[in-house]
Image (spheres, rainbow, N blue to C red):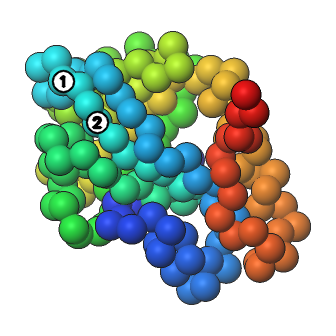
Amino acid sequence: MQVAIMVDDIETACANWTKTTGIGPFLHVPHVKLEEFDYRGTKSSGLDFSVAIAQSGGVQIELVQQHSDGPSAYRDTIAKGEGGFHHLGVYTDDYDTAYASYIDQGFVAAVDGIFGGYRFSYIDTSKAIGCMIELIEANPAQTDFFERIAAAAEGWDGVTDPIRPGFPAVVV
């Protein structure tokens, strides 16, 4: 349901995607910070990255920029300063079964974590299929976000607000 590309500059990448393909608008979520996650079986922290996601038909285009310098599933296949295809996203109601199916085939999790109270992982399938698989446990907040991405693309004029906040600003 999702194709993810690593980029070095997310705003420039959004503009290039929109200009080149007409895909958009991109909903931008800057500086997502994972304070705790397992990286290849070791407790890790401090992963800082941004995402921008747009809908194209039945597929999401996700652009990802890693800001922090530490190891990650992103840096396992795409070097800092480089860009390229990174993963396919799989949104699943049965996370345990999907996860076990990859592990049973001998693949390993590059990253296991929890975001917003729900599990996700990057399964390193890169030697078999040329990319990783991101498993995302289905949950109401993520479903709402994905529905907003699809709704933004419906009837978009290709010009107005090509990069939009993924979440409304919080007024204090």
Residue extending farthest right: 155
- Quadrant where the C terminus is found in the figure: top right
* Residue corresponding to mark 2: 47
Describe residue 32's horizontal placement relative to residue 18 as left or right.
left
Describe residue 96's horizontal placement relative to residue 26 as left or right.
left
* Residue corresponding to mark 1: 44
Describe residue 10's horizontal placement relative to residue 59 as left or right.
left
Where is 18 relative to 5, above or below? below
Residue extending farthest bottom: 20
Residue sitting at 71 percent across and 40 percent down?
A: 169
Kindly indicate the quadrant of the structure image that contains residue 80.
Answer: bottom left
Residue sitting at 73 percent across and 41 percent down?
A: 168
Kindly indicate the quadrant of the structure image that contains residue 61.
Answer: bottom right
Where is 171 relative to 67, above or below? above
Neighbor class of circle 1 (other Cα within 10 Å; few <14, some 14-19, many 20+) is: some
Describe residue 15's horizontal placement relative to residue 109 as left or right.
right
Neighbor class of circle 2 (other Cα within 10 Å; few <14, some 14-19, many 20+) is: some
> Which amino acid type is shown beneath numbered disc 1?
Ser
Q: Position of residue 129 (x, y in %)?
A: 25, 53
Residue sitting at 44 percent across and 38 percent down?
A: 32
> Which amino acid type is shown beneath numbered disc 2?
Leu
- Tell me if residue 92 can be seen: yes
Q: Position of residue 81 (x, y in %)?
A: 22, 68
